[in-house]
Image (cartoon, rainbow, N blue to C red):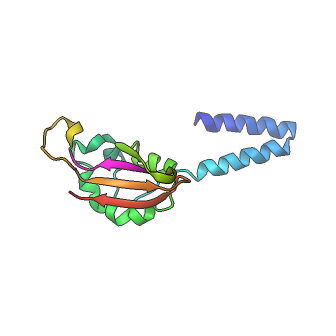
Amino acid sequence: MVLLAKMKRILCSTIISGSRKTIGNIVVVLILAGCTSKIDIEGFDQENWKRDRFGCEGLRYNMKGVLSISSNQLLGSSQHQILQTFGSPDQRELYEKNQQFFIYLLEPGPKCGADSGRVSVSSFQIRFNAIGQVSEVVLKEF
């Protein structure tokens, strides 16, 4: 909201001063800002997802069906959109040629404090290509 208020003030003062180049730049920024909103996934509870860091509460695991159905919807999305939708990943992995993975754990693992004896836990993995777009979505079950 503060950013929009500042942009509005700049736009108004620019209109008064008559600088068309600056007006054009502001319009482009506003259009681009509108393109990076969160992704709307039917049946996805964003609040519970973000609250369940590392899958410790088991809330994320209950959403695995929704994730499986909607995985194709995420293809081509930007990193910013993924961060707005799912929050910070539990793990990030860098891969060759500037690719990276965001890994979201779906069930309790070692970081939850419970010694489950499990080496691997189910996860939701999003792969980004070199330009920061989703190129692959994988739901790993163990």
User: Looking at the picture, does residue 65 appear above or below residue 106?
Assistant: below
Residues rendered magenta in the picture = 99-108
Judged from this view, the residue extending furthest toward the front is 96
Q: Identify the image quadrant of the N terminus.
A: top right
Quadrant housing residue 4: top right
Residue at the location (79% across, 35% down)? Answer: 13
Q: Residue at x 12, y 44 (%)?
A: 117
- In which quadrant is the C terminus drawn? bottom left
Measured as percent of width and height from the top left, residue 123 is found at 29, 53
User: Considering only vertical position in the picture, is 10 above or below 97?
Assistant: above
Residue 52, can we see it?
A: no
Depth check: 96 or 68 in front? 96
Magenta run includes residue 106:
yes
Q: Residue at x 22, y 42 (%)?
A: 56
**Residue 14 in the image: x percent, y percent?**
81, 38
The answer to whether residue 11 is above or below residue 38 is above
Residue 25 lies in quadrant = top right
Q: How many marks?
A: 0
Q: Nearer the viewer, residue 108 or 99?
A: 99
Left or right of 88, for residue 4: right
Q: Residue, x 62% and y 36% (percent of image)?
A: 3
Q: Residue 127: within the magenta? A: no
Q: Give the left or right position of residue 97, taking residue 92 as reference.
A: right
Q: Is residue 5 left or right of residue 21?
A: left
* Foreground of the two, 65 or 40: 65
- View extreme (right): residue: 18
Q: Nearer the viewer, residue 48 or 128?
A: 128
Place of residue 136 in the rendered image (x, y in percent of width and height, measured from the top left): 42, 61
